[in-house]
Amino acid sequence: MLKNLKGYFSNDLSIDLGTANTLIYVRGRGIVLNEPSVVAIREESGRGSKSIQAVGAEAKNMLGRTPGNITAIRPLKDGVIADFVVTEKMLQYFIKRAHGSRYFRPSPRVLVCVPYGATEVERRAIRESAESAGARKVYLIQEPMAAAIGAGMPVHEARGSMVLDIGGGTSEVAVISLNGIVYAASVRVGGDRFDEAIINYVRRNYGILIGEATAERIKHEIGSAYPGEEVREISVKGRNLSEGVPRSFTLNSNEILEALQEPLQGIVGAVKGALEQTPPELGADVAERGIVLTGGGALLKDLDKLLMEETGLPVVVADDPLTCVARGGGRVLELMDEHGAAMFALD
Amino acid sequence: MTHATDNSIDSADGPGIQLRRAREARGMDIVDIAQELHLDTWIIEALEEDDFAALGAPVFAKGHMRQYGSLLGLPTDDLMIAYYRVRGRDDAPPAPITATMTRPAANRNVAWAAIVLAVIVLGGLAGLLWFMSDRPLVGGNTDEPEPAPAEVVPPPSFDPGLAVDAVLDLPADSGAADALQTGASEFPADTGDTAVDAADDSPATNTPPPLPVSGDTFELTLRFSDRSWVEVSDPGGRIIYGIFEAGSSRSVSAEAPVELYFGLVGAVEVVVNGQPYAVPASSIRGNTARFVIGN
């Protein structure tokens, strides 16, 4: 009863609960929150109790830089919840911020986008986490469907549309027709694996250890998925493993390209697998119009070129790929009131 | 309306013409392009003829156009500006993200309205009860004179007239945010919304220099101290559109009224006929601002 009353004062939300970033779309207002999915927890000395020190961008700045009594953690791993309690606290904080009210706890209807490969247990964990965070009603939608809708693909048509959503923890490829997923696959390769590959490459070839934040910066600045004419360089610092002291060194884009080969081949393999499994009529539609890239991974330089060369198909990057999933979820919330939750096979 | 800045391509042309000219300048034919992009030749022809409807959903038309422009070395931002000029606003890109939280206007106003209304009702009930209970105590005689009006006014900390005005002036739509932010300053400030509140606290910024009126032509210059998304339209259509980098600037001759929409308002300096123009605080929502010059 109280939840329903509070629901009157709460706007519907669409949440892209990602491994790397959480985005919230508020119905009627657009995307209002885009924060890293990171929580910093402080342990009170002596008492053993824990409290939230920071959430989001502030907590991300603490990653790898915390003293002993503070732990900065990412509560989601590979697209699913790894730490239920911390995820719940993080969602609670984000929902309250998205809603903005200081006077009462919001109780909105929430649509959460979940990876296609999420198990029933993982889906239940996400649902319960959102409910515990104050949601009045929780709907789950598969990420590739939300990504395709957010990218503006004609998912309702009787034609095949292929979307590749590259997130922080997973990459999802799907062929969609008539508002339904015809084929989809999820591989646990994403932006995090790119960072790991860079860290491993630097350790192996330079004997230097760098942190996740540095690896991410390298990826953003000189990361590339396909050989280009221009070779870019970046100067970074890390700890020399043999000397034990910080050292500065220079990396170039060709080295990062080499470092990223393994995770990139994982994504290419998933796309090729999807094309093999796609019914021929839909495959012909995809071959004519192309594959659409969404997610933060789509911002990796020349990823579209790599996929174009590997598959022989046209590949395009959606407008603002980072927000496609959250925007698609928001659009589904709007359509849901008009056509009902069954339209997109929501849970 | 003329563009004062230099562009590597003629921005007055449609995107298709720009692509065709660039292709011909490089001595390539349509088949070469189609092979490079793994597209059918009819798609290349449709792009060059600005026949976007044939390409289906905008995501494909825009995506293929970016790939084509990139292959020819054309600046894709300029191509997209030309695309939106041809295709119109219906196919506008997604709104920019507001990195910091914007003021949730509608909900907060509804909540305020409910709180104020509840206080008024409770105050009214309390006053009525006091009035009813006071009469017999005065003398137990209904012929006793009415209590003085000063005795029935609510406590001094509560101003019913103000509260009633706030409620009555509160429309259900998000426009109510302006009423609350500018007029009803009696409401406590929200320390969380620093961008909006800081702007509200400095009324001096709301007094722009003499402005052009409707029908006037004036020089509009935008200078960027950080990367920002910008859209500017005058009665003739969209005149500036796209993402601009820090340190860049854009000047146009525009006809009033001109509508401006900034993604990161703090990064954009507006100059009208050589005079700095302060963005009205009431037009700012988080990092974005939408306002009209010369209305």
Image (cartoon, coloured by chain):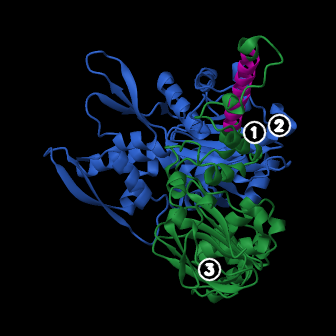
Chain colours: A blue, B green
Q: What amino acid is at disc 3?
A: Pro
Work out whether residue A346 or residue B128 is closer to the camera in this orientation and state it.
B128
Residue A333 marker: 1
Tell me: residue B170, above or below residue A1.
below
Q: Quadrant of residue B23?
A: bottom right
Chain assignment, label 3: B
On the rendered image, what quadrant is the N terminus of chain B found in? Answer: bottom right
Tell me: residue B191, above or below residue B3.
above
Work out whether residue B46 or residue B28 is closer to the camera in this orientation and state it.
B46
Disc 2 to disc 3, C-alpha distance: 48 Å
Q: Are marks 1 and 2 in contact (CB under 8 Å)?
A: yes
Mark nearer the viewer, 2 or 3: 3
Residue span colored magenta: B111-134
Direction from residue B1 to residue A298 in the image, left or right: left
At 51% from the left and 23% from the top, the residue drawn is A84
Tell me residue A262's x, y (percent). Answer: 45, 47
On the rendered image, what quadrant is the C terminus of chain B found in? Answer: bottom right
Q: What kind of element bears circle 2?
A: helix
Q: What amino acid is at disc 2?
A: Asp
Direction from residue A52 to residue A341 in the image, left or right: right
Chain assignment, label 2: A
Work out whether residue A236 or residue A286 is closer to the camera in this orientation and state it.
A236
Taking the view exactly as shown, the residue that stands out farthest to the left is A243
Q: What kind of element bears circle 3?
A: loop
Q: Are marks 2 and 3 in contact (CB under 8 Å)?
A: no
Chain assignment, label 1: A
Disc 1 to disc 3, C-alpha distance: 45 Å
